[in-house]
Image: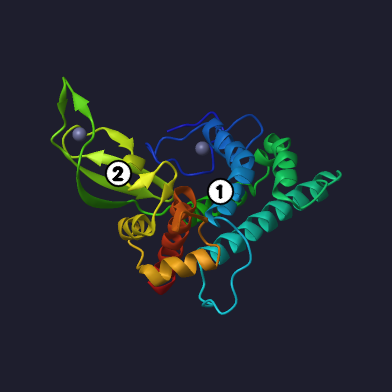
Amino acid sequence: MTQTFAACILEHRRQPERARPALDGAWICFGHREELARLITEMPAVSDDLTRANGPGGPRPPGTSGGITVDDAASRHRSHIAGVMASWARLVSEERGITPPASAAVEHTAVWLTVHVDWIAAQRWVDEMLGELRQLAGRARGIIDIPARVCETGQRCLQHADGERCEGTISIVVRGDDWTARCSACEERQDATPYLRARGRWVTRDGVLQLARIAGIPCSEDVVRQWKHRKRIKAKEEGGVTWYELGSVQTYLANRRQQEAARERIAS
Ligand SMILES: [Zn+2]
Ligand SMILES: [Zn+2]
């Protein structure tokens, strides 16, 4: 086989044996240049997603366990991302003899590096940089992604069709702090709130216990009191009844699940 063009130096998943022409003056093909540009421009968003994975911040109460939580893993990875992006920016600015980005913050380095994508594509180390950025994004996804949890509630579907109430029963699907209801019969994704013993955006202590059971987080009346006391979940008193804000409970439970997932990853 004769090649009249310089081939992309990277591997290609589809038809790996077929050589891809590198862009003019570059070491990589069009597709890989696109991937490189995307990884760079999306890195601030990836970093933001890790912040969100931290959940609502605030000081950790004294005396809580010192185990490694997803918070630590996420914030460590955020600094790692910032460090790697800054070091590539430094390399480019030194080799090109130009002013480096205004700061080492990923928002600055990403925008700055985007301008130099074509120059980077023409450097022999472009494969190293692309590999490193892929790893950063992949590891971030691993920290952010929590497997969905499906919990059968035994409740009857509230949907109606042709004047008949649906015969199906409802499972709640929890993915992070996203809660949806799924019916066994009508297969439609529904808002979970009507099935969560909520009154509007507020639930009673029994409601919190039900939510914790659905999320798979061990809980008891005492534990609910502690969460409230530590301001992990929002509460208000009304006529002698304590109401808990649904969103704050869902977010807190999502956080707890991430922590468990991170612990399992570390243990395995
Ligand atoms: Zn390629
Ligand atoms: Zn249904």
For label 2, the crowd category at 10 Å Cα-Cα, with few meaning under 14, some 14 to 19 and many 20 or more, is some
Residue 79: tell me if it is visible: yes
- Cα distance between the residues tagged 1 and 2: 29 Å
Residue 222, quarter of picture: bottom left
Extreme top residue here?
162
The quarter in which the C terminus is drawn is: bottom left
Q: Nearer the viewer, residue 224 or 141?
A: 224
Amino acid type for the residue under numbered disc 1: Asp
Q: Secondary structure at mark 1?
A: helix
**Which mark lies nearer to you, 1 or 2?**
2
Provide the residue designation for mark 2. Answer: 195
Q: Which mark is residue 49?
A: 1
Q: Earlier in the sequence, mark 1 or mark 2?
A: 1
For label 1, the crowd category at 10 Å Cα-Cα, with few meaning under 14, some 14 to 19 and many 20 or more, is some
Amino acid type for the residue under numbered disc 2: Tyr
Extreme bottom residue here?
63
On the rendered structure, is 174 left or right of 131? Answer: left
Q: Position of residue 64 (x, y in %)?
A: 53, 76
State whether residue 213 is above or below residue 223: above
According to the image, what is the colour scheme of the structure? rainbow
Q: Position of residue 137 (x, y in %)?
A: 54, 50
Q: Nearer the viewer, residue 166 or 52?
A: 166
Residue 127: tell me if it is visible: no
Q: Position of residue 239 (x, y in %)?
A: 46, 54
Q: Secondary structure at mark 2?
A: helix
